[in-house]
Amino acid sequence: MSRRHSPLLRRGRPLRRLAVSLLFVAVGTGLWHFQARELRDSLVWMGVPEWQQVSPTSFHRVLRNEGFLVGWSDVRVNPLWVSYRLQAVEDPRSGPRPGFRQDWRTLWPIGTDHYAGSGFDRGHLAPNYAIAAVHGRDAQLDTFYMSNMTPQRPDLNRRLWQRLEEVVMDHFVPRFGALQVITGPVFPEGFLDNVFNRVGFVEVPEAFYKIIVVPAERPLALAFLMPQGVRGDEPLDDFLVSIDELEARTGLDFFPNLPAAAAEALEGRVSTRGWALEEVANRPGRFE
């Protein structure tokens, strides 16, 4: 029998094609994973936030957007943390304010009008203006995903929180050139204590945090914890806390790759040295 008509050869061809296909899939998957990891790491400093202890409420997924990452919880139906980098740009500006968008990646169908009539605002965690100015229009559009929203009282969202966002972009970024920011909600310690405190599917936080880091050889950090019930005109420095306190309140390790000695120095104390916070702590918001 000639080799051209050998049954063994005919059976071997599909196997070779399958092997080649699997090789392409493996290589392609590896390149995609490497690229995704590289992009993800470019939006964090000292590692993606991790849980100190595993619990039913610690399960979350990392959603990658243009310019920022979201640690999304399908249990609390909230972003548990949002991480982004800011840097000085020559002409910071944002485009027209986009409309809110439902995010197909979330388990629960959170519509754009989900908070209507609740008394809560759709509070941005990755801020519209700063993300747009640094990362561009596509990134600005992504900040209007409902997965970047959390229920905030109007006096917090439109006044105190908005003032802090302005200070970060207008005062700290020009001062230091580059910043790492991690922000998110804080919930009561016991999940059952808050399980029915919801707007539809979405659990309502009791407070919000923001950590701002200058990622230098000797890093600097400021951390804020702001409760829902603020008036909105309080000095920003009234809400300073240590990163250690935020880790205790949230259960997160915000910078898991930071060496222990550096973490103790950065996270264990409150220091405003070098930030000139006193110059802007009482500055009114742009819309006040």
Image (tube, helix red, strand yellow):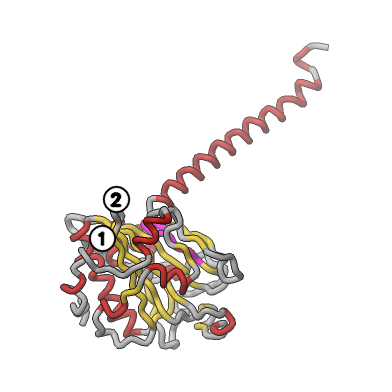
Q: Position of residue 78 (x, y in %)?
A: 49, 72
Q: Main secondary structure of the magenta part?
A: strand
Q: Looking at the picture, tell me which residue is in the foreground, 140 or 85.
A: 85
Q: Which amino acid does label 1 sit on?
A: Ala
**Residue that appears at 25% across and 76% down:** 163
Image side of residue 138 versus residue 52, left or right: left
Image quadrant where one finds the N terminus: top right
Q: Does the magenta stretch include residue 117?
A: no
Q: How many marks?
A: 2
Residue 71 is inside the magenta segment: yes
For badge 2, the amino acid type reads Glu
At 50% from the left and 83% from the top, the residue drawn is 199
x 17%, y 58%: residue:
91
The x, y position of residue 149, in whole percent, is 42, 72
CA distance for labels 2 and 1: 26 Å
Give the magenta range.
65-72
Residue where numbered disc 1 is placed: 133
In the image, farthest residue toward the top: 2
x and y percentages locating residue 204 in the rendered image? 48, 81
> Quadrant location of residue 27?
top right
The residue carrying mark 2 is 217
* Element assignment for label 1: helix
Q: What element carries label 2?
A: loop
Look at the image and tell me whether residue 101 can be seen. Answer: no
For the residue carrying disc 2, how many other residues have a C-alpha within 10 Å: few (<14), some (14-19), or many (20+)?
few
Residue 231 placed where, x, y %? 30, 88
The quadrant of the rendering that contains the C terminus is bottom left
